[in-house]
Image (tube, rainbow, N blue to C red):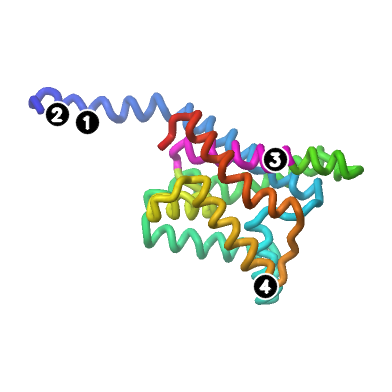
Amino acid sequence: MPDHLSKELPEQLPKQLSKQLPKQLLMLMIGMFLIGLGICLYVQADLGAEPFTVLAQGVSCLTGLQFGRAMQSLNIAIILVILIVDRSHLGLGTLLSAVLVGFFADTLMNWIPHAPNMPVAVLMLIGAVTTMGIGVGIFIASDLGEGAVEGLMMLTHRKTGFEVRWARILMDSVCVLTGALLGGSIGVGTLVGAFCTGPIIQETLRILGYS
């Protein structure tokens, strides 16, 4: 590479990053909002928790920890694993998601009521799985770091060579099976989420051109 080009590239890179950052932050916020909306719809549909929640319920039953503490403990454990294996998955998004996803979910539950009947519950479940998958895809594509669950999924994808959808299906299936064996509760929504969220994430990443 010519000397003048090698000198120009380091100078151009910060400018490119600074131009991309507002777009990345916007994608990050949209992704987290949609994930929070997905969690809210799962809860209000009441047809079964999403897979990671089932695992947290199981850990709570096994250890006696309150559900929130069990969820926090799982997140911390996963982040530590990612930190050891491949810390490139961690970043600003990892920190923000730990706070804002739950905030969005709690806030939206004040506005979105519990499903009054089965047809509405089914529609809410479809919305939950769809918004969760799209939200995770946008969150990852922002390239500002991944949450614990998303980071574990992408780590599985890159270390095994599985497509994203299969990595997510594998991870969700393990969460559901382990959580159920430990005492977590599952429903039709849990199973739909386990098998449909991964393909939606992969398609979202494809549309956004993320690889």
Cβ atoms under marks 1 and 2 closer than 8 Å: yes
Question: Is tag 1's residue or tag 4's residue first in the polypeptide sequence?
Answer: 1
The residue indicated by pointer 3 is: 37
Q: Is residue 161 above or below residue 57?
A: above
Furthest residue toward bottom: 63
Task: From the viewer's side, name the closer residue of 125 and 23.
Answer: 125
**Quadrant in the picture for the C terminus:** top left
Q: Is residue 112 left or right of residue 86?
A: right
Looking at the rendering, the stretch of residues picked out in magenta corresponds to 126-144
Q: Residue at x 57, y 51 (%)?
A: 98
Q: Is residue 35 above or below residue 47?
A: above
Q: Secondary structure at mark 3?
A: helix
Q: Which mark is residue 6?
A: 2
Q: Is residue 203 inside the magenta stretch?
A: no
Q: Which class describes the residues within 10 Å of circle 1: few (<14), some (14-19), or many (20+)?
A: few
Q: How far apart in space, not on screen, are marks 1 and 2 (Cα)?
A: 7 Å
